[in-house]
Image (spheres, rainbow, N blue to C red):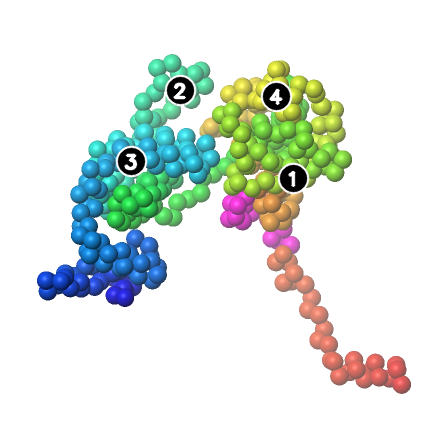
Amino acid sequence: MSVRLRQWKNKAGKVEEAWQVDFVFQHSDGRRQRVVKFSPVQTRRGAEQYERELRSAILNGTFGKEQKSEERITLAKFTQRFLTFSENNNKNSSVFSKRQILKHHITPFFGEMALAEIGPAEIEDFKALMRSKRSAARARKEAPTKAAIRKRQNADAKPLSLKTINNVLTVLHKLLSLAEEQRVISQAPRVRLFGKIAKPAFDFLSFDEAERLVAAAEPEWRLVLLVALKSGLRQGELIGLQWNDLSLPQGLLHVRRTIWRGIEGLPKGGRERTVDLPASVVDVLKAHRHLRGRFVFCQEDGQPLTPGKMKAPLRRALQAAGITREQGQIGWHDLRHTYGSHLAMRAVPLKVVQELMGHATIEMTMRYAHLSPDTRREAVSVLDRPSVPVCDIRATRAVEASNHP
């Protein structure tokens, strides 16, 4: 096999490497043809398999002809195939997000371009365009909601954040990788993301603000706010919570589903989890038991709540409690941040916080680490404790021997 791991330095001086196929094929008429290509599968075995496929294509007379078919498939034409794949393998919220990204960013730039023509230079041009794009660049609805109008007031359009641009680039990478996997193109170009992005800041309520919020809430919304603050459930998990998910005698809440735009699915990360409830929440849940249906929090007809119906009650409760912010406003996800922040401030180990909140990695939970200074202070305080006297093992054995003649 004529495969090797090629190494080179890029413009920044960083060493890069990739598996490459490099062989000479001798035709029956004596002609010699050299083939040099990077393997689509970047492993030694993948490169060896790719060489076998190339040799077979030369023997069959199909080598090089696949390039013509590549040029006829534009990104716009391939988009539906990509969305079909996403619908089969991703959550509905992920599919919706990809549709929006394709519609507002990727298709307007790459839509009429053949997939085979999209290379590193075109991708860098796209990144430059995205960096100059404004967050309000997309078309607005002809009949906006009152909430959308309020959001526009005194709001200047800001450049897209690097995190948003990285989300767009990730979708582009997945689309090109699928095109390679389905043999629409021979090799997908590398899509470089922006690195070293600062984690977005989050807001949370103080202990006093949390108590005031629950006390000021309208009676029918008081329990859902209390459960959000004391369990850390995401909004979709609150909407999907059913009575059979509760083990009130044991004080347990099982997070088994989320509801997004009326569609049930597994919680984020595809994993169920169990949350311990404080006694105060258990007592209120027992008193809240209703017969309107299977959902704990529901409308009058038993149907589950929607994010739209939950927005105004939270805003009214914040106003009644006198809770304001100089920038932005508290939302339902900030109640989840409040749960994680309060646990950290009460010196709960971050590993336990991770399990309770259902974070996939401890890195996601580390955002709350700065809120538990007492825990770290106690940890380093052991360095100032008096040293333990050195133990003389021979003297100890002598004393033991004298006690046991």
- Residue drawn at 27 percent across, 49 percent down: 187
Q: Is residue 375 visible?
A: yes
Mark 1 vs mark 3, CA separation in Å = 43 Å
Tag 3, which secondary structure? helix
Q: Marks 3 and 4: which is nearer the front?
A: 3
Inspect the image, locate mark 1, and give the three-letter code of the amino acid beneath it.
Val
Quadrant position of residue 28: bottom left
- Which segment is the magenta one? 359-378
Residue beneath disc 1: 275
Question: How many numbered marks does the figure carry?
Answer: 4
Task: Give whichever of discs 3 and 4 has the lower sequence position.
Answer: 3
Answer above or below: position of 271 versus 26.
Answer: above
**Left/right of residue 104 with respect to residue 267 in the rendered view:** left
Q: Which mark is residue 153?
A: 2
Kindly check if marks 2 and 3 are in contact, taking CB atoms under 8 A apart as contact: no
Tag 1, which secondary structure? strand
- Quarter of the N terminus within the rendering: bottom left
Mark 1 vs mark 4, CA separation in Å = 21 Å
Q: Marks 1 and 3: which is nearer the front?
A: 3
Task: Give whichever of discs 1 and 4 has the lower sequence position.
Answer: 1
Inspect the image, locate mark 2, and give the three-letter code of the amino acid beneath it.
Gln
Q: Is residue 109 visible?
A: no
Quadrant position of residue 207: top right
366 in magenta: yes
Q: Marks 4 and 2: which is nearer the front?
A: 4
Residue beneath disc 3: 78
Residue beneath disc 4: 298
Inspect the image, locate mark 3, and give the three-letter code of the amino acid beneath it.
Phe
- Residue drawn at 62 percent across, 47 percent down: 352
* Residue density around tag 2, few if under 14, some if 14–19, many if 20 or more, within 10 Å: few
Mark 2 vs mark 3, CA separation in Å = 39 Å
